[in-house]
Image: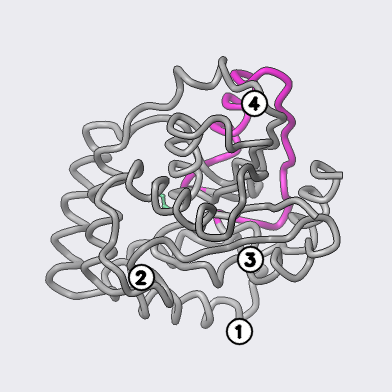
Amino acid sequence: MSHLLLVHGFPLDSRMWRAQVEGLAGVRTVLAPDLAGHGADRSAPATSLDGMARHLAGVLDAAGIDAVDLGGLSMGGYVVFAFLRLFPERVRSLALIDTRPGADTEAGRAGRDALAAAIREHGAAAARDAMLPKMFAGPASEAVRAETERMMLEQPPGTLVADVLAMRDRPDSTPDLAGIAVPTLVVVGAGDVITPPAEAEAMVAAIPGARLELIPGAGHLAPVEQPDAVNAALRRFLS
Ligand code: MLT
């Protein structure tokens, strides 16, 4: 069976994909690695999106895998755009989930600096405070929220600062969209306030042949909040 590589968001790790690893096992061998410095990977974090993409290429090299279906959520989507620029021949299809192609605005960059400073001072709790209230649209259970919070608090602060600065300095991928030549699915939670549906719709319009799946009852972490609906969308796309 061919492989689906899923790239996690910030300030999370590969555990956010648990429902996809289980639920999509019938259609792909699902690989959900931790980015360097996240989760169980305690190596030094990458300091750029390109560095994260190179880490993933190394994961594929180590497993002897040439090309994959590639999906990413939010920061993971930014990594997907970097991977596509660096290793286009290794990408069979794209799933862009609750993410956006654009770079940060000036205000966004200032916000990154403030968040990096807060994490240096208060640790992972500062990332939790900034992100957790914006992750879910509502119906996520207490258990899911608690598990997500725990995942956030377990990331090393140095890794989270590196993520924030890498996102601050990421390039604009919008000019790449018209040239995407692989089948592309865009998935977005209907209640995503971080990368809202309007941005997903603009991305779909810019990528030749791209399809949109809007997930009702989900915010930014749609694969965690509505795993069955997201898995069904991915299954339709991959089959
Ligand atoms: C993420 O969910 O990975 C981050 O919210 C992305 C971002 O802050 O731009």
Residue on which the image places disc 1: 143
Q: Residues under labels 1 and 3: Cα distance?
A: 11 Å
**Callout 2: few (<14), some (14-19), or many (20+) C-alpha neighbours within 10 Å?**
many
| Vertical comparison of 214 with 59: above or below | above
Q: Nearer the viewer, mark 2 or mark 4?
A: 4
Residue 205 part of the magenta-drawn span: yes
Q: Residue 63 appears at what percent x and percent y? A: 57, 60
Q: In the image, what residue type sits under mark 3? A: Val
N-terminal-most mark, 1 or 2: 2
- Residue at disc 4, secondary structure: helix
Q: Residues under labels 3 and 2: Cα distance?
A: 16 Å
Q: Residues under labels 1 and 4: Cα distance?
A: 33 Å
Does the residue tagged 3 have its C-beta within 8 Å of any atom of ligand 1? no
- Residue at disc 3, secondary structure: helix
**Callout 3: few (<14), some (14-19), or many (20+) C-alpha neighbours within 10 Å?**
many
- Residue at disc 1, secondary structure: helix
Does the residue tagged 4 have its C-beta within 8 Å of any atom of ligand 1? no
Q: Residue 74 appears at what percent x and percent y? A: 49, 48
Q: Residues under labels 1 and 2: Cα distance?
A: 16 Å
N-terminal-most mark, 3 or 2: 2
| Vertical comparison of 12 with 9: above or below | below
N-terminal-most mark, 2 or 4: 2
Q: In the image, what residue type sits under mark 2? A: Arg
Residue on which the image places disc 3: 224
Residue on which the image places disc 2: 128
Q: Residue 127 appears at what percent x and percent y? A: 31, 66
**The C terminus sits in image quarter:** top right
Q: In the image, what residue type sits under mark 4? A: Val
- Magenta segment boundaries in residue numbering: 193-220
